[in-house]
Amino acid sequence: MAESILSLDSKDKKNMPLEYTTEEGDLRIVGFWIFLAAELVLFGTLFASYLVMQSHTAGGPTARDLFKINPVMAETIILLVSSFTCGLGTLELRRHNTKGLIAWLVVTVILGFAFIGLEANEFYSYAVHEGAPISRSAFLSGFFILLGTHGAHVSLGIVWVTSIIIQLAQRGITAVTARKAFMVGLYWHFLDVVWIFIFTAVYLTGLVI
């Protein structure tokens, strides 16, 4: 890999995305893909655990009792739109438009906060108003752990994107900031894909069964 990068002439490097133009950037992006693969295993395990425990309600509220389609649709739309705005940020990155990249990342952060706010309200409603805290049943334990893990990842993503916005404002688009913006974009899209599985396997299945 190192030899292939070093052997590129200046014309080839100019045509490459900025984040791939250094050996360090290339290696870090490959390492990040490996990290995402490990995250996939983590969420796969949580999904499997939830599906096994879904019917174990211990006489407490079931998924059909708790889940309401409108709030869940709102969360889904917000996260899908945030993934779109993050993609627009990557497009501005390709154009070397620092202001455009920052603007779309700011919108992504705002949407991320909106998603977390709705999810926190959902958890509070279940635990306080519906009498369905995490300790009530195996079903609720699996639900809160799966959704909480995803929410924690989104919260981490908000902090990460915010830190990159600050770096872009200070340094502009460089090989390093381009690599960081590209990687956080991959991370955000990954969380969006995980949410689609949550929406399907948790909410839609829960409303039907």
Image (spheres, helix red, strand yellow):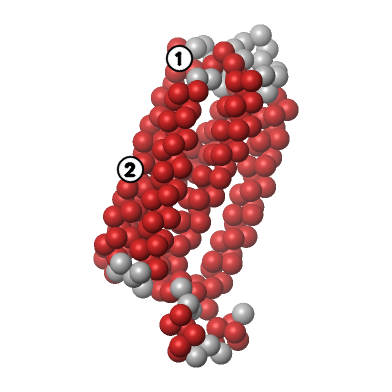
Work out which quarter of the rendered image holds the N terminus and state it: bottom right
* Residue displayed at 45% across by 23% down: 70
Q: What element carries label 1?
A: helix
Can you tell which quarter of the image residue 177 is in? bottom left
Percent position of residue 5, x then y:
55, 83
Q: Is residue 148 left or right of residue 87?
A: right
Label whose residue precedes the other's in the sequence (2 or 1) = 2
Secondary structure of the residue carrying numbered label 2: helix
Q: Which residue occupies 47% across, 35% down?
A: 76
Q: Residues within 10 Å of mark 2 (few under 14, many from 20)?
A: some
**Looking at the image, is 123 positioned above or below residue 158?**
above
Amino acid under label 1?
Answer: Val
Q: Can you see residue 138?
A: no
The number of callouts visible is 2
Query: Can residue 207 be seen at all in this image of the molecule?
Result: yes
Q: Considering only vertical position in the picture, is 62 above or below 32?
A: above
Q: Outermost residue, top direction?
A: 59
Q: Where is residue 75 in the image (x, y as percent from the top left)?
A: 44, 33
**Residue at image location 48% in from the left, 77% down from the top:** 16
The quadrant in which the C terminus is found is top right
Q: What amino acid does circle 2 point to?
A: Ile
Position of residue 156 in the picture relative to residue 35 (left or right): left
Q: Closer to the camera, 26 or 89?
A: 89
Relative to 14, is 31 on the left or the right?
right
State the residue position of label 1: 128
Residue 110: which numbered mark, if any? Answer: 2
Observer-nearest residue: 143 or 17?
A: 17
Q: Which of marks 2 and 1 is in front?
A: 2
Of the pair 65 and 171, the residue shown nearer to us: 65
Residue at horizontal 45%, vertical 88%?
11
Q: Is residue 113 above or below residue 141?
A: below
